[in-house]
Amino acid sequence: MIHMKDVSKIYEDNGAMALDHVSVDIGKGEFVFIVGASGAGKSTFIRMLFREVLPSSGVLEVNGRDVTKMAESEVPYLRRGLGVIFQDYRLLPDKTVYENVAFAMQVIEAPRRLIQRSVNSVLDVVGLREKYKAFPSQLSGGEQQRVAIARAIVNDPAIVIADEPTGNLDPETSWDIMDIFLRINKSGTTIVMATHDKTIVDTLRKRVIAIEDGHIVRDEARGVYGYEA
Amino acid sequence: MKLRTSEYFIREVLISLRRNNWMSFASVGTVAVSLFVLGVFMLLVLNMNRLASTLESQVQISVYFQDDIKDSVRDKVEEDILEMQGIESVKYVSKDEAMERLKERLGDQKYLLDALEEKNPLPDSLEVTVKMPEMVETAANAIVKMDGVEEAKYGQDVVEHLFDITRLMRIFGLALMVLLAGATLFIISNTIRLTVFARRKEIAIMKYVGATDWFIRWPFLLEGMVLGFIGGIIAALALRSFYAAMAAKIYSTLAFFPLMPQYPFMNYVSVAIIVSGMVIGTIGSTISLKRFLKV
């Protein structure tokens, strides 16, 4: 699913080396936590996967596509195979729950009947079917993140990439969100999640990749967070 | 483009026009004013061209006699002209007749002639019509050499003057056009920039979920096009009433002035104006997209 070989990233504006010859493989259906201090290169790692950041050197393949050699015009098609979730939800405030999720299908010109069916079904997955008419401002943080997850999975992506999805949520709500991720993962979707949440990582015992100063310092199959919370 | 996609685009454009109503209004206004001024120049240039070519195609030469010549000389000139090749007709106009015509032409202002106190300064003349416009110059040159002939005038000098003026107006119009087009582009691209700014979150999300660049660009291009289109329509309507009013005014004073008839001429002008509006609008949004929409 994800193949990274000798990937480095140097930011041109300040010359900082965010990733230094990183190699890693992530297979289909895996659930991977990316951990590390702020500024260690976690965010760069995550953002490279959906080609928001382009590697300076090395080979990066995501979902069978060569990200480094890809033409600009192919990027949208790479992203259609990925679902991206952020800490700050990034919902459109003037659209309802339903519209926020449907939006992801409209802009890739999916057939209308398919949109209706898929949106209803993912709203069931995240448990927000009844609130489909609500606006984001009428929802709690956890509910907003669930809408964002619904939007990320509505196009049935092979990989879900989440950048600190529980960062703004209280522990109980975080577990609700993790529960959804586990269910998505069970259906065969690969999940790559950057997180600072020690309890979640230590409890779930999934694969953990730790990044420090641009290097992968640890890659364990049933890992733990390994830092003080 | 798929039907539901067009629906989506149209809805997006309407939302955006409403959201930026003041900027949209300003854009439409600028487009309308600019295109109206352009249109006025277009009308002027086209009409002057027409006037010039009408005069150029005139086959008449006015032959003025010297003062106090004998009737025999005059008759001789008339006969000689009739014997020339390519002459259609020759008509004698006495000085009294010429005076009558002048009074008629002056209309309300014929009191100006009172100053002459019954003295008639106008010469006797012949109106010579040739068969083809190309022959006018040769014929006039031959006639002016005849005895008793003071002058043989035809449209040429007027035509040349008119062409000079038209050329100047074209240059001036072009400069003005560049200036106005620049202003219009500026304000349209600013409007679109506001739209892009207002929707930057939406654009970011569209990119994350894999919308193509063109899918993202289209609503903005359409918005610019619509702004230009509306401005163009307003300018075209204003130009039509302007031309109708001007035509009425000109015909009431100069009945024989060869104005371009309003139909279908004004339809072509309207189409040209509206199309220019759309083109300017589209270019304006393209500029903005290049600068502010990193997709």
Image: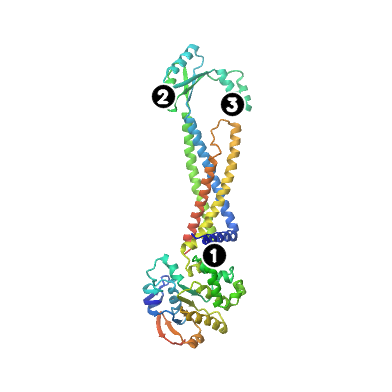
Work out whether disc 1 and disc 2 sit on a shared chain: yes
Would you say the residues marked 3 and 1 are in contact, meaning their CB atoms lie under 8 Å apart? no
Instruction: Give the residue pinned by disc 3.
Output: B105
Give the amino acid at mark 3. Answer: Arg
Q: How far apart are marks 3 and 2 (CA)?
A: 30 Å
Image coordinates for residue B278, horizontal then vertical, percent: 51, 52
User: Which mark is on residue B199?
Assistant: 1
Q: Is residue B115 visible?
A: yes
For this rendering, which residue is in front, B37 or A204? A204
Chain letter belonging to callout 3:
B
Left or right, residue B193 beside residue A27: right
Of marks 3 and 2, which one's residue comes earlier in the chain?
3
**Residue type at mark 2?**
Thr
Looking at the picture, tell me which residue is in the foreground, B273 or A217: B273
Find the distance from the CA under tag 3 to the CA under tag 1: 66 Å
In the image, are marks 3 and 2 on the same chain?
yes
Indicate which disc residue A41 carries.
none
Q: Position of residue B146 (x, y in %)?
A: 43, 17
- Circle 2 residue: B138
For marks 1 and 2, give the CA distance: 72 Å
Colour mode of the rendering = rainbow
What chain is tagged by disc 2?
B
Image location (x, y in percent) of residue B95:
55, 18
Task: Name the quadrant of the N terminus of chain A.
Answer: bottom left
User: What's the chain of the residue with tag 1?
Assistant: B
Residue A95 screen position, x and y as percent:
58, 68
Q: In this view, does B108 lie to the left or right of B68?
A: right
**Above or below, comparing residue B85 to residue B72 in the picture:** below
